[in-house]
Amino acid sequence: MLKSNIEKALNEQINKELFSSYLYLSMGNYFESINLSGFAGWMRLQSQEEYQHAMKILNYVNQKGGRVVLQQIADPKIDWESVVSVFEDTYEHEKMISGSINDIVDLSLGEKDYATHTFLQWFVNEQVEEEATALKILEDVKMIGDYKAGLFMMDRELGQRAPETEEA
Ligand code: OFO
């Protein structure tokens, strides 16, 4: 069984991961609207990954005999000023998600819930990658600035991203 405060925190995290999925889907739509289909495809895959993160937590809660309570997903932003501002938001969002995961890690230790603590290690590692990827793309698009040929090349590069094969 899960303690009720752990169950609540995991349910909130499911909501945050689903919101992440929604946010990246919205960013993908923004990129489609400015004809950057490679960036859009990258964001759609990111959105799918976030959905898998939510499912991973949902499966864990069920496995531990907890109750999954799906909550309302907030409206994501739909417009950005620039490509750079999208990745600034992405990087900030991932830092927020890392903080949220770390808070549940702290909680699980405080409650001596070692199973949840171990389960969350995958997310701790994943967040290192998520932040690093967002920061790398942010730095690249900042460097490119208004140089259209650079943006075109990066659009083609990001469009080659392949879906993750790992099961949620
Ligand atoms: Fe689920 O890692 Fe991003 O938000």
Image (spheres, rainbow, N blue to C red):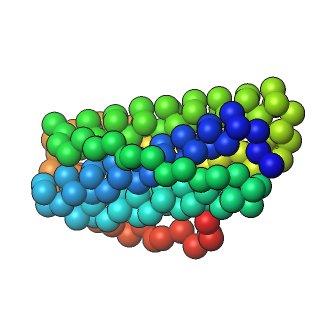
Relative to 18, say whether 153 is above or below. Answer: below
Please identify the quarter of the rendering in which residue 74 is found: top left
Q: Work out whether residue 127 or residue 144 is closer to the camera in this orientation and state it.
A: 127
In this rendering, does residue 81 appear at all? Answer: yes
Left or right side of 70 for 116: right
Left or right side of 61 for 41: left
Relative to 40, say whether 108 is above or below. Answer: above
Left or right side of 108 for 157: left
The residue depicted at 65 percent of the width and 29 percent of the height is 103
The residue depicted at 54 percent of the width and 50 percent of the height is 69
In this rendering, does residue 137 appear at all? Answer: no
Q: Work out whether residue 114 or residue 85 is closer to the camera in this orientation and state it.
A: 114
- Across and down, in percent, residue 137 comes to 39, 45
- Across and down, in percent, residue 42 comes to 36, 61
Left or right side of 79 for 26: right
Q: Work out whether residue 144 or residue 168 is closer to the camera in this orientation and state it.
A: 168
Please identify the quarter of the rendering in which residue 159 is found: bottom left
- Across and down, in percent, residue 167 comes to 62, 70
The residue depicted at 75 percent of the width and 56 percent of the height is 65
